[in-house]
Image (spheres, rainbow, N blue to C red):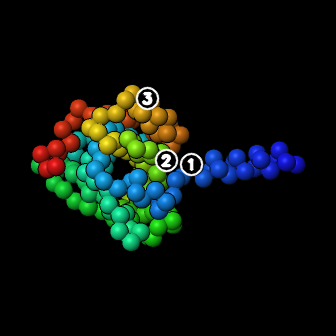
Amino acid sequence: MKILVLIMELALICGLQADIKLGNIASQLTGEWFTIALGSNVTQKIEEGGSLRLFIKNIGEQNGIIKGTFFKRENGKCVQFSVSTKTEMGSPKQIEYDGLNEVSLQSIDSVHAIFVFHNSNNGKVTTWAELYGRTPDLPNEMKKKFEKICEKFGIRRDQIIDMSTDDRCSNLR
Ligand SMILES: *[C@@H]1O[C@H](CO)[C@@H](O)[C@H](O)[C@H]1NC(C)=O
């Protein structure tokens, strides 16, 4: 019986870790970031000219609302824009951008963060994922970890783009 309870507790802990609550780790999340890699099961969206080819600049938090500031290229020119989560801390996170995006934070520490999004636009669902780093590049083991998480969500390795050599609109930083 004791073992059963322990197993159930472990399952619960693991389950909770699978989707880190954004509200509890706001301090770890905020500040400057770089997009290290992008993945999507609809690769046109993360290729040049795609609506989800986004480069993170920073993440802020105010009164439970998380705000991300990004760069993207429009007709070859870099532009900056911001998006915010719709709901309060601790509840499911949604961001309106190119439709509606359900946000899930999959992994975070002092050097990296991995987000997975489900984008719904006109009844079509696109899964996309971003690997963020505090520095413009990250060690290979972090990229491997990103690949593993992407795979879990149906994004293949050939659907991942390493962005570390792209200039990522650094002229706007
Ligand atoms: C991408 O993933 C979503 C969610 O799993 C799925 O609904 C959609 O059909 C997938 N799209 C493609 C092109 O595989």
Q: Pointer 2 and pointer 1: residues touching (CB < 8 Å)?
A: yes
x and y, in percent, of residue 67 in the image: 32, 62
Left or right, 90 with respect to 55, comes to right
Q: Is residue 19 visible?
A: yes
SS for callout 1: helix
Q: Pointer 3 and pointer 1: residues touching (CB < 8 Å)?
A: no
x and y, in percent, of residue 97 in the image: 32, 61
* Residue located beneath label 3 in the image: 141
For badge 1, the amino acid type reads Ala
* Residue located beneath label 1 in the image: 18
In the rendered view, tell whether residue 149 sits above or below residue 101. Answer: above
Residue closer to the observer: 163 or 25:
25
x and y, in percent, of residue 99 in the image: 36, 61
Q: In terms of sequence position, does the residue under pointer 3 or pointer 1 come before the other?
A: 1
Q: Mark 2 to mark 3: distance in Å?
A: 16 Å
Q: Give neighbour class at mark 1: few <14, some 14-19, many 20+ (Cα, 10 Å).
A: few
Residue under the image location 23 percent in, 32 percent down? 165
Residue under the image location 43 percent in, 63 percent down? 94
For badge 2, the amino acid type reads Gln
SS for callout 3: helix
* Residue located beneath label 2 in the image: 106
Residue under the image location 35 percent in, 56 percent down? 30
